[in-house]
Image (spheres, grey):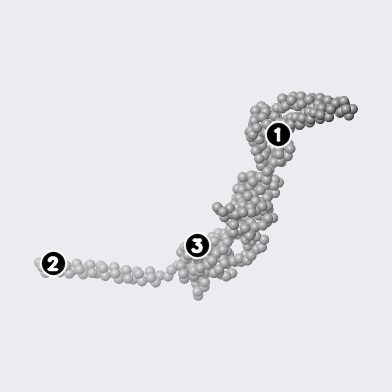
């Protein structure tokens, strides 16, 4: 019995030994296969480092402001008798906008005019009498003073009547009126806003480090969302003489001609200030660069026998312009770099270049949206 059990144990041990031995041999040959299996080449796109001429520009944002813009108030109380414009009309300087009821003031003017006529008549009567020394000089002077007072009272009444007629202080576009016919207004009541849009101001700020790059008379360009396919040109007219201590920025004002009045007060604008001289730059697509905290990396394509391999290269980048990035250090004109598929690359990796035009990265320095 004991002998049989010993034989069974020996047989079981041999069986398990054969099983584990088989698996060990299989794993050994499998690991050798994978270790020696050739890595398939990574498919990438490639671009050469090219030279271009760039005009340095300073980007910023701003808001348009009217050269003249005001809410027109009532200067005197009264009932609105007439409205002489329509909402949104282009009005000229001096054009009548509102007329207030002035019947009481006109009646008072007639009384004052009559009083002035009487005073002038009496003064004219006293002058020859004074010449014949039939009246005293003080009496004549008193009457002449009454003439002056009557004339001043009439002029004051005329000014009051004039204020009953409300005119446009400058040419511009009238907004939506805030009062109606027959409405009684008091001094300071808001009637309508007028905005002058041609020309129009653009206010924006720049960091103080750009102060030496801007001068009065310099040309700038601006884009607005309302007209995405247009770029408007203006001229710097004023530079704030002091720097804001809280933000370290300077306030700048430019003027834009606006004959079609496309630009309106309050519009948001993307501003670009170009330098006068262009410079040579080396550039590659943005997709060819791995941006890392320790530095920016590209994969250079090199020939090794019949194969193409990639090697990492640390580069220094400059300005960006659309889909392209300036390279200031690390590459030369004509160098080829991988421009897609960077995540699957490593030093010495074998690559294959896909030349399908539809798969190539964008390389425009001034890309435009598809709806333009």
Which label sits on residue 31? none
Disc 3, SS: strand
Return the residue nearer the eye: 281 or 311.
281
Q: Residues within 10 Å of mark 2 (few under 14, many from 20)?
A: few
Q: Say whether disc 1 or disc 2 marks the residue closer to the N-terminus.
A: 2
Q: Secondary structure at mark 2?
A: helix
User: Farthest residue toward the right?
Assistant: 132
Q: CA distance from mark 1 to mark 2?
A: 124 Å
- The residue at which mark 1 appears reads as 166
Q: Earlier in the sequence, mark 3 or mark 1?
A: 1
Q: Position of residue 199 (x, y in %)?
A: 69, 47
- Residue 175 drawn above or below residue 107: below
Q: Are marks 3 and 2 in contact (CB under 8 Å)?
A: no
Dot in front, 1 or 2: 1
Asked whether residue 353 is in view, the answer is: no
- Which residue is painted at 52% across and 69% down in the image? 300
Residue under pointer 3: 291
Q: Position of residue 281 (x, y in %)?
A: 61, 65
CA distance separating discs 3 and 1:
64 Å
Task: Point out the tag, 3 or 2, that comes first from the N-terminus.
Answer: 2
Circle 2 residue: 5
């Amino acid at each position: 019995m004991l002998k049989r059990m010993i034989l069974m144990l020996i047989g079981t041990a041999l069986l398990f030994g054969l099983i584990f031995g088989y698996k060990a041999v299989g794993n050994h040959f499998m690991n050798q296969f994978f270790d020696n299996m050739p890595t398939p080449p990574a498919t990438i796109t490639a671009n050469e480092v090219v030279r271009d001429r760039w005009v340095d520009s300073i980007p910023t944002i701003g808001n348009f402001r009217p050269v003249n813009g005001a809410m027109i108030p009532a200067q005197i109380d009264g009932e609105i008798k007439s409205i002489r414009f329509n909402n949104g009309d282009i009005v000229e300087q001096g054009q009548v906008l509102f007329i207030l009821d002035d019947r009481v003031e006109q009646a008072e003017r007639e009384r004052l005019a009559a009083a002035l006529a009487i005073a002038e008549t009496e003064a004219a009567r006293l002058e020859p009498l004074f010449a014949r020394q039939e009246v005293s000089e003080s009496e004549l002077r008193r009457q002449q003073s009454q003439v002056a007072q009557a004339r001043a009272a009439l002029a004051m009444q005329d000014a009051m009547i004039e204020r009953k007629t409300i005119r446009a202080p400058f040419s511009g576009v009238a907004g939506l009126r805030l009062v109606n016919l027959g409405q009684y207004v008091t001094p300071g009541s808001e009637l309508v806003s007028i905005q002058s849009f041609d020309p129009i101001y653009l206010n924006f700020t720049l960091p103080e480090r750009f102060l030496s790059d801007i001068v009065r008379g310099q040309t700038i360009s601006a884009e607005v969302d309302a007209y995405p396919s247009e770029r408007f040109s203006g001229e710097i007219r004023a530079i704030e003489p002091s720097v804001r201590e809280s933000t370290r920025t300077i306030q700048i004002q430019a003027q834009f001609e606006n004959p079609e009045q496309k630009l309106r007060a309050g519009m948001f604008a993307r501003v670009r200030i170009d330098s006068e001289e262009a410079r040579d730059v080396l550039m590659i697509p943005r997709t060819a660069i791995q941006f890392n905290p320790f530095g920016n990396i590209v994969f250079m394509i090199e020939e090794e026998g019949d194969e193409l391999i990639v090697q990492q290269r640390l580069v220094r980048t400059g300005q960006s312009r659309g889909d392209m990035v300036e390279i200031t250090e690390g590459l030369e004109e004509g160098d080829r770099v991988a421009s897609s598929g960077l995540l699957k690359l490593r030093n010495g990796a074998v690559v294959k270049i896909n030349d399908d035009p539809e798969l190539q990265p964008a390389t425009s320095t001034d890309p435009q949206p598809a709806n333009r």
